[in-house]
């Protein structure tokens, strides 16, 4: 009986160690994902404030090798919304923006 309880105890301890290791791995993965998400939002509060002050004005947004001109409609944590020169609403993900030039 003692041997059977001892075996169950060892098995339970082993399971706990495995689960603890898995939890630690998941914590690291969540931290990495949070960092990735944070790197894809408009970075600085001052940048967001400045952009909010430009809502309703014309500006040019550089997206990699392309320039998009339009009127800034809204500033969101992870994208900008513009009305382009043809009257279309354009959503530009923050992670694609390389430069913003107020006109």
Image: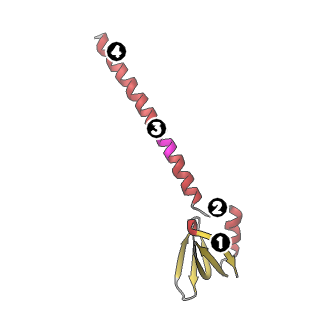
Q: Left or right: 12 with respect to 48?
A: left
Query: Which residue is label 3 attached to?
Result: 23
Residue found at x 52% / y 84%: 88
Callout 1: 10 Å neighbours few (<14), some, many (20+)? Answer: few
Residue found at x 53% / y 49%: 32
Closer to the chain start, of discs 4 and 1, is 4
Q: Residue 6 carries which label?
A: 4
Measured in 3D between alpha carbons, the distance from the residue under mark 4 to the one under mark 3, in whole angstroms, is 26 Å
Asked whether disc 4 touches disc 2, contact meaning CB atoms under 8 Å apart, the reply is: no
Q: Quadrant of the C terminus?
A: bottom right
| Of the two numbered discs 2 and 1 in the rendering, the one whose residue sits closer to the viewer | 1
Q: On the image, which quarter does residue 7 sit in?
A: top left
Magenta stretch secondary structure, dominant: helix
Closer to the chain start, of discs 3 and 2, is 3
Q: In which quarter of the image is the N terminus?
A: top left
Q: Left or right: 37 with respect to 48?
A: left
Percent across and percent down for residue 41 are 59, 62
Q: Left or right: 89 with respect to 46?
A: left
Residue found at x 54% / y 52%: 34
Measured in 3D between alpha carbons, the distance from the residue under mark 1 to the one under mark 3, in whole angstroms, is 40 Å
Query: Which residue is label 2 attached to?
Result: 43
| Of the two numbered discs 4 and 2 in the rendering, the one whose residue sits closer to the viewer | 2
Q: Which residue sits furthest top? A: 2
Secondary structure under tag 1 reads strand
Q: Residue 99 carries which label?
A: 1
Secondary structure under tag 2 reads loop
Measured in 3D between alpha carbons, the distance from the residue under mark 4 to the one under mark 2, in whole angstroms, is 55 Å
Secondary structure under tag 4 reads helix
Magenta stretch in the rendered image: 25-29
| Of the two numbered discs 1 and 3 in the rendering, the one whose residue sits closer to the viewer | 1
Q: Residue 72 carries which label?
A: none
């Amino acid at each position: 009986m003692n041997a059977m309880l001892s075996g169950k105890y060892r098995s339970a301890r082993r399971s706990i160690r495995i689960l603890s290791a898995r939890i630690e791995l998941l914590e690291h993965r969540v931290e990495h994902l949070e960092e990735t998400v944070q790197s894809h939002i408009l970075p600085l509060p001052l940048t967001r404030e400045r952009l909010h002050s430009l809502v309703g004005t014309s500006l040019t947004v550089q997206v990699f090798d392309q320039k998009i001109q339009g009127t800034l409609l809204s500033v969101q944590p992870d994208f900008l919304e513009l009305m382009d020169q043809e009257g279309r609403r354009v959503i530009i993900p923050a992670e694609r923006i390389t430069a913003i030039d107020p006109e």
